[in-house]
Amino acid sequence: MSTATSTALIILAAGQGSRMLSDLPKVLHKVAGAPLLWHAMRAGAALEPARQIVVTGHGGEEVAASAMAYDASAEIVTQSEQLGTGHAVAQAKDLLADFDGDVIVLYGDTPFISPETLACMAKARRSHDIVVLGFEAADPGRYGRLVMQGVTLQKIVEFKDASEAERTITLCNSGVIAAEAKTLFALLEKVSNDNASGEYYLTDVPGLGAAEGLTATAVTCDEAETLGVNTRAQLAEAEAAFQARTRAQMLEDGVTLTAPDTVHFAFDTYVGRDAIIEPNVVFGPGTTIETGATIRAFSHVEGAHVSRGSIVGPYARLRPGAELAEDSRVGNFCEVKNAEIGERAKVNHLSYIGDAEIGARANIGAGTITCNYDGVFKHRTVVGRDAFIGSNTMLVAPVSVGAEAMTGSGSVITQDVEAEALALGRAKQVTKPGLAARLMERLRTLKANQKSAKQEGKV
Ligand code: UD1
Ligand code: MG
């Protein structure tokens, strides 16, 4: 058995978030393409928790589904009435009845607690029974206040219950608290709702612990880490904070961002060293950009993998399942979805490539479309290596074009084309000498006659 204390994470996510004015539970609002709850779960994951419990209430089913989608090992407990943060944590008591390690409580609406901060808390737990995460607040407002004596946390007092003197304290409670599971649940039994809000406060735990001779202390972090989301304005602030931090990190990691402030990353965007990201590029979730790839201006990239040396855009859209092999090209006004683009293959202009496999070095002519959807089912298109697809070819799937085969421009390809063949699927051209000039003459005469009839008032 490892000597390190095992940790159970409890994430509070039962609140309604009434100030969001939303039908969506607050913790499911997104920052960088991921629900706030996922950010909190990711923060907690830094502790490698043995157990992960999400307390749900408002929108419980949706919140539970989201938690499980992020991590199938998450356990859900329901708090059917929101009677306070202490009551919320107590809901996990039965699940953790046999659990021997530490509990750490995080809020589902507080997305940015850093791994370093949680590591500091874990370290402080070695010398104190209870550890609370505090911060020096620029505007302490209605936060709970940490009443300290030296390094000892005597108690936490909620703003509503605080004396004038206590309200002058600027060291505030972030909400994150760590203690041994058994200690925490025993103290929670003693928490009452005899206070200004009529709620069971989690924050009563350090004070109750002190009365029993337990020790408590506070670890502090930057206020930015404890940013909680209660309003749409704070959601936008959280987004801006995430983006600013990620851009700075990318630059530090050796990624070129021509105009950093215009690039938007998702919570899990990976960009390799020496990649170049031009202005106004937006990343959705699930993207990997390898070393030395270039994403040119105004591209939207989501769920895609772009390999070394590939160039995407300007104005390209990569959707989930776009797999670009090394040195491939996807150019302006092209959309690629659930498709592999082979090594050094080119899809350079105005194309839609969906549910397809494009072989190495194949050239997909301008305006080529894979007609993948028949209104009910999706079908696959396979283009072999070194094939040449003429401009404006409609590839009506399911269909394949063999290696080194060609299609004529403007073809509608409905049957498989064997390797090295040329397929033409278009109407044959008919040319009528002089007909254009005669036609135009007739139309111009017709217009002139109409004009003079009008002037004579006949029409
Ligand atoms: C809480 C702290 C306060 C701290 C502040 C930091 C308490 C009593 N007060 O106050 O000291 O400065 O956070 O932001 O803990 N929740 C539930 N079930 C409940 C009540 C709350 O799941 O019954 C969840 C909420 O959804 C939210 C979190 O717990 O994610 C905090 O609850 P909230 O009501 O926002 O507490 P505050 O009044 O902000
Ligand atoms: Mg709050």
Image (cartoon, rainbow, N blue to C red):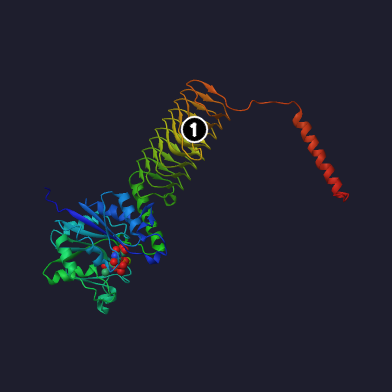
Ligand 1 has an atom within 8 Å of the beta carbon of the residue at disc 1? no
In what element is the residue under mark 1? Answer: loop
Give the class, few, some or many, for how many residues have Cα within 10 Å of label 1's Cα (few <14, many ≥20). Answer: many
Q: Residue furthest front?
A: 376
Q: On the image, which quarter does residue 127 sit in? A: bottom left
Residue at 38%, 55% (x, y): give it. 30
Instruction: Decide if residue 171 is in sight here.
Output: no
Q: Is residue 218 left or right of residue 291?
A: left
**Image quadrant in which you'd find residue 195:** bottom left
Q: Is residue 407 left or right of residue 161?
A: right
Which residue lies most toward the bottom here?
164
Q: Position of residue 282 (x, y in %)?
A: 44, 48
Which quadrant of the structure image shows residue 98? bottom left
**At which x and y percent is residue 297?**
47, 44
Q: Quadrant of ligand 2?
A: bottom left
Quickly name the residue at label 1: 397
Answer left or right for 325 relative to 442.
Answer: left
What residue lies at 33% left-to-right and 59% top-to-bottom? Answer: 60
Indicate whether 412 appears above or below 113.
above
The x and y percentages for residue 113 are 28, 57
Report the amino acid beneath label 1.
Ala
Q: Is residue 279 above or below residue 207?
A: above
Residue 10 makes an appearance in the image: yes
- Residue drawn at x 86%, y 46% is 453
The residue lying furthest to the right in this view is 456
Q: Position of residue 310 (x, y in %)?
A: 42, 35
Question: Which residue ends up furthest to the top in the rendered image?
Answer: 420
Q: Nearer the viewer, residue 348 or 272?
A: 348
Name the residue rendered at 12%, 67% in the picture.
Answer: 214
Tally of numbered discs: 1
